[in-house]
Amino acid sequence: MNELNEKPGLNTGEGTKDCSRRSILLGTAALIVGGVAGRIGNSYAEPEPNYPPAPPLPWKWPKLDPMEAGTRAYRTYLSNRG
């Protein structure tokens, strides 16, 4: 017992940290909250990029009937055997 008391830090609690489930969960939660807070702060710090508007399409966009397109696709699938 005297040998243990002669070496500093073995039985006195100096330099050792309690590794309980609670301390691990608290540390993990603090890390996650800090990361989320940092990410939110970073997203507000950057200005939103301004892109030029997209050019118009070189063709006219036709209106499609969903039922007719589905019927044609089904018939084409069956006629080509998968």
Image (tube, rainbow, N blue to C red):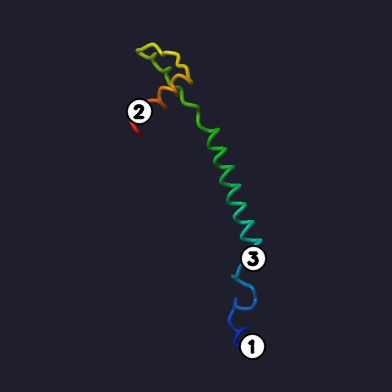
Residue at the spot of label 3:
20
Image x and y of residue 16, in percent: 60, 70
Residue 66 left/right relative to 2: left
SS at badge 2: helix
Badge 2 vs badge 1, beta-carbon distance below 8 Å: no
Q: Would you place residue 49 above or below residue 56 in this image?
A: below
The disc placed on residue 79 is: 2
For marks 1 and 3, give the one nearer the viewer. 3
Q: Amino acid at mark 1?
A: Met
Mark 2 or 3 closer to N-term? 3
- Pick whichever, 59 or 22, lies toward us: 59
Q: CA distance from mark 1 to mark 3?
A: 26 Å
Vertical position of residue 16 compared to residue 40: above or below? below
- Quadrant containing the N terminus is bottom right
For label 2, the crowd category at 10 Å Cα-Cα, with few meaning under 14, some 14 to 19 and many 20 or more, is few
Disc number lying in front (2 or 3): 2
What amino acid is at disc 2?
A: Ser
Residue that mark 1 sits on? 1
Mark 2 or mark 1: name the one nearer the start of the chain. Answer: 1
- Badge 3 element: loop
Q: Quadrant of residue 53?
A: top left
Residue positioned 63% across, 67% down in the render: 18
**Could you say where residue 54 lies in the image, as x and y percent from the top left?**
41, 18
Count residues near mark 1 (Cα–Cα under 10 Å), then give few for <14, some for 14-19, many for 20+: few
The answer to whether the residues at label 2 and label 3 have Cβ atoms under 8 Å apart is no
Q: Amino acid at mark 3?
A: Ser
Q: Secondary structure at mark 1?
A: loop
Q: Could you say which is closer to the camera, residue 3 or residue 62?
A: 62
User: The C terminus appears in which quarter of the rendering?
Assistant: top left
Q: Which mark is residue 15?
A: none
Residue 30 rendering spot, x and y as whole percentages? 62, 52
Q: Earlier in the sequence, mark 1 or mark 3?
A: 1
